[in-house]
Image (tube, rainbow, N blue to C red):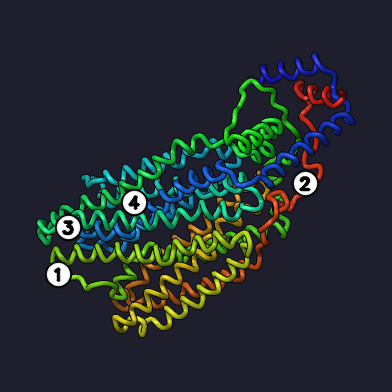
């Protein structure tokens, strides 16, 4: 292999004289202007069908992610009826099936975020979806064995599924931000992330359909042998493969982002062709035989990474984005993965009767409650952000969201006893709880996804987004472990009010971390990278193919 490289270098020097420095500088200036002109075309492009396609292709993955994450909120109750002692999973089993995915997601965000900057967004896009589909299908087929229980098998596959889900965060965020025009970038990224709400809603809807469909056969089971509930949770989990399978083909056809091609592969000519094709026809063509003209530009390395983030102006953005996501996910997943426990604790719905009919009523109430929380709080919150993020700004929305959540969780926590004292008061609790869900999404849950996808240079954008997102999942893990071990202090679900008070504290800290962030609205990704773009292209590689540029320049 080294012999081939040496031969190639020798043939270059034999066939072509060394390019004079002045002409190399002139060529570098030309390529730098081409790069900036190409980026301007992307930044000023009108909304097209290609942009809408990117939103739906990336969004379908997020719908799958959210479905798989939040379906376990319902499925864990079903698993308890079938495999738990006393028809309920013990604390460790419940924690295992709920925390496995966030742990895997944390790992996936770091790995795929880094690989997205090293190997490319397109090359990794679709691989994470294959992991999700495979692991989801495997969960639905899990069974008991002599060496391992079905709960243990589910925990392992949910961890693997989480790795795929984690990969979706940085890749989808960066692909949508790097293809978006400056004017619509916030809306485009929020539109992608809003599919998370639909995934949550779909999980509750499928759960309700399955429960109602199995009502009659469920009533034929004995109170101690709920065989048909085993069918129900498998159908609920297994359906998560459907949206992912639909999106898989389209993910494999998404082109590489022009910014990656220019700034990391350093191939300005190919990036320019890609931009022209995508903006005009929505298609792109890669000629394997085309001459590659690489430029000299800042490259990712350990030393360069330390140099960039050693500047406080850059580091504070990473810290602010990471901690804001951490604080938000303490509450978002602490509640989202335990909605069934919260609804049971406040006595939502008809108190379940004993026996089989009680099982049916309990499962139905959990599904209906999750539907209400999704439709009344989560989904509207995403679209409130969608309509305002490119006019009001990311930072004001995040500050407002954290402020409102601090107030709401204080009211829910300190007023918990009065808000759950009577059926009428419970309705007030549910309203405030939906309002908290609304301001999570019309607030930091949306903006913590958007801001790190905009705020860093191309060579570190996916990595930095992965770090920020992984910080959020660390918060989800902390919340779930804490919720599991604290919720029953003083009696069954007696610590819920104090958990809500703790969530209020973390929302308060999120206000201060938001102050570290820069407003990204209306600014190009290159401006937000905090790097001088004048002369970003420092030169050409000096290989034989660069003489074609020099010859063109001389003419």
The answer for how far apart the CA atoms under marks 3 and 2 are is 64 Å
Q: N-terminal of the two: label 2 or label 1? A: 1
Q: Is residue 98 left or right of residue 8?
A: left
**Residue position marked by numbered label 2 in the rendering:** 533
**Residue position marked by numbered label 4 in the rendering:** 155
The answer for how far apart the CA atoms under marks 2 and 4 are is 47 Å
Q: Pointer 1 and pointer 3: residues touching (CB < 8 Å)?
A: no
Q: Position of residue 177 (x, y in %)?
A: 60, 48
Q: Position of residue 195 (x, y in %)?
A: 46, 53
Q: Measuring 37% from the left and 74% from the top, which residue is drawn there?
A: 430
Q: Is residue 175 left or right of residue 416?
A: right
Within the image, what quadrant is residue 85 found in? bottom left
The local secondary structure at tag 2 comes to loop
**Residue position marked by numbered label 3 in the rendering:** 215
Is residue 114 visible to us here?
A: no
Choose mark 4 or mark 1, whichever is in front: 1
Q: N-terminal of the two: label 3 or label 4? A: 4
Q: Measuring 75% from the left and 41% from the top, which residue is drawn there?
A: 36
The answer for how far apart the CA atoms under marks 4 and 1 are is 30 Å
Q: Is residue 422 above or below residue 462?
A: below
**Residue position marked by numbered label 1 in the rendering:** 354
């Amino acid at each position: 292999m080294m012999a081939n490289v040496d031969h190639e270098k020798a043939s270059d020097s034999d066939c072509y004289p060394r390019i004079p420095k002045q002409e190399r500088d002139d060529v570098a200036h030309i390529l730098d202007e081409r790069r900036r002109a190409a980026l301007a075309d992307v930044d000023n492009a009108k909304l097209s069908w290609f942009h809408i396609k990117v939103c739906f292709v990336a969004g379908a993955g997020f719908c799958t992610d959210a479905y798989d994450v939040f379906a376990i909120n319902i499925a864990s109750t079903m698993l308890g009826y079938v495999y738990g002692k006393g028809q309920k999973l013990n604390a460790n089993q419940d924690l295992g099936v709920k925390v496995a995915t966030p742990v895997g997601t944390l790992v996936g965000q770091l790995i795929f975020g880094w690989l997205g900057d090293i190997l490319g967004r397109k090359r990794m896009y679709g691989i994470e979806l294959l992991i999700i589909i495979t692991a989801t299908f495997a969960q639905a087929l899990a069974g008991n064995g002599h060496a391992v229980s079905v709960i243990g098998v589910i925990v392992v596959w949910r961890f693997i599924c989480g790795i795929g889900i984690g990969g979706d965060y940085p890749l989808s965020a960066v692909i949508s931000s790097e293809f978006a025009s400056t004017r619509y970038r916030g809306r485009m990224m929020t539109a992608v992330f809003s599919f998370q709400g639909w995934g949550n809603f779909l999980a509750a809807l499928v759960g309700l359909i399955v429960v109602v469909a199995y009502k009659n056969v469920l009533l034929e089971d004995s109170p101690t042998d709920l065989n048909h509930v085993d069918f129900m949770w498998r159908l609920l989990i297994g359906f998560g493969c459907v949206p992912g399978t639909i999106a898989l083909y389209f993910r494999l056809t998404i082109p590489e982002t022009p910014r990656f091609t220019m700034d990391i592969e350093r191939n300005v000519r190919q990036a320019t062709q890609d931009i022209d094709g995508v903006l005009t026809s929505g298609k792109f063509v890669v000629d394997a035989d085309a001459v590659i003209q690489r430029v000299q530009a800042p490259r990712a390395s350990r030393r360069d990474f330390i140099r960039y983030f050693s500047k406080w102006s850059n580091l504070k953005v990473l810290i602010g984005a990471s901690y804001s996501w951490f604080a938000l996910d303490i509450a978002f997943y602490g509640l989202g993965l335990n909605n069934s426990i919260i609804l049971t604790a406040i006595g939502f719905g008809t108190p379940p009767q004993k026996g089989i009919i009680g099982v049916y009523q309990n499962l139905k109430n959990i599904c209906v409650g999750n539907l209400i929380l999704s439709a009344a709080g989560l989904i509207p919150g995403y679209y409130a952000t969608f309509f305002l993020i490119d006019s009001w700004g990311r930072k004001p929305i995040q500050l407002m969201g954290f402020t409102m959540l601090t107030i709401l969780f204080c009211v829910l926590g300190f007023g918990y006893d009065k808000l759950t004292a009577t059926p009428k008061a419970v309705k007030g609790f549910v309203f405030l709880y939906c309002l908290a869900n609304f301001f999570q999404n019309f607030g930091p849950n949306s903006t913590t996804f958007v801001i790190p996808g905009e705020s860093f240079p191309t060579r570190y954008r996916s990595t930095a987004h992965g770090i920020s997102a992984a910080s959020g999942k660390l918060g989800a893990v902390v919340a779930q472990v804490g919720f599991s071990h604290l919720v029953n202090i003083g009696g069954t679900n007696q610590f819920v009010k104090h958990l809500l008070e703790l969530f209020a504290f973390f929302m308060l800290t999120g206000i201060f971390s938001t102050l570290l962030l820069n407003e990204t609205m209306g600014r190009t990704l290159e401006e937000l990278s905090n790097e001088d773009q004048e002369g970003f292209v420092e030169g050409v590689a000096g290989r034989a193919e660069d003489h074609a540029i020099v010859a063109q320049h001389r003419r």
